[in-house]
Image (cartoon, grey):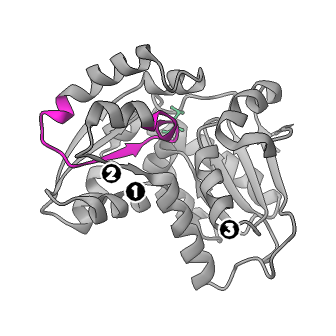
Amino acid sequence: MNQNPIGIFDSGIGGLTVLREITRLLPGENTIYLGDTARVPYGNKSRETVERYSLEIAHFLLRHGIKMLVAACNTASAYALDRLKKELAIPVIGVIEPGAKAALRATRTRRVGVIGTEGTIRSNAYSSAIKALDPDVSTFTKACPLFVPLAEEGWTDDDVTLSVAERYLGELKGHGIDTLVLGCTHYPLLKGVLAKVMGAGVTLIDSAESTAEEVKRVLTERDMLHPGAQARAEHRFFVTDSPERFVTVGRRFFGERLDGAELARLAE
Ligand code: DGL
């Protein structure tokens, strides 16, 4: 069982930022990634739909023998994590709680900003997770839907992205936050621009890094780490549409190790 892969899913390519951190921290672990490229974006869909998609993906990955499931999508974590935890017999990890914990470790002023998709912000998942850990922290949120297509387009250091960021984040800056949670898988790619707009006094929290730490913590605690250092772990990629585009764009997130993707049939 310990040699079995970790299953990681996202609505598309964004979750590769989480996969990247997991492979950095746990290089011996085999992984299977599923990007639901046929149905992306999840960010503007209802809770019911995102829950249904997430369960279909979880069952697909279970058929491939995963030992743990990581919902590497903020919207899926916000809407479907409870249901996944209830229905699956393996450990399930989302990105919200690790991001919330990292924000609390970073903030001094106890004023924390959160940006994400419309669904993630509407669900209030980050604010609830932060307040559950420390009720005295104030949170200020903003949905930034245009960041996802800008990241997909590769416009990570571009004047257009800078001006979109200034417009979205101006309001948050006015609240005097010292920490900003990047509550969407794609946003770590825009870190340079976001840091420029927010200024040196604001710490950016990338939930990918803290999620990878959580994966390691849970696998260690349950004695589920892959035995022995593997010379080369296996990373398998599935998508629900257009493998070629996934590979081209995904390499911006994951590098040359992404050397091909297979088409997944979810309903079986
Ligand atoms: N993966 C999504 C998230 O982290 C962003 C893309 C989408 O809207 O599906 O919320």
Residue 65 place in picture, x, y as percent:
81, 64
Q: Is residue 5 magenta?
A: no
Q: Work out how far the residue at label 1 is from the one at label 2, CA to CA, in angstroms.
A: 8 Å
Residue at the spot 30% in from the left edge and 30% down from the top edge: 197
Are dots 3 and 2 in contact, CB under 8 Å?
no
Q: Amino acid at mark 2?
A: Tyr
Q: Amino acid at mark 1?
A: Gly
Residue 106 place in picture, x, y as percent:
28, 60
Residue at the spot 65% in from the left edge and 52% down from the top edge: 19
Are dots 1 and 2 in contact, CB under 8 Å?
yes
Vertical comparison of 3 with 206: above or below: below
Quarter of the rendering containing residue 224: bottom right
Q: Secondary structure at mark 3?
A: loop
- Closer to the chain start, of discs 1 and 3, is 3
Nearer to me, 216 or 24: 24
Q: Which residue is mark 3?
A: 26
Q: Which residue is mark 2?
A: 126
Q: Secondary structure at mark 2?
A: helix
Residue 113 in view: yes
Q: Which mark is residue 99?
A: 1
Quarter of the rendering containing residue 216: bottom right
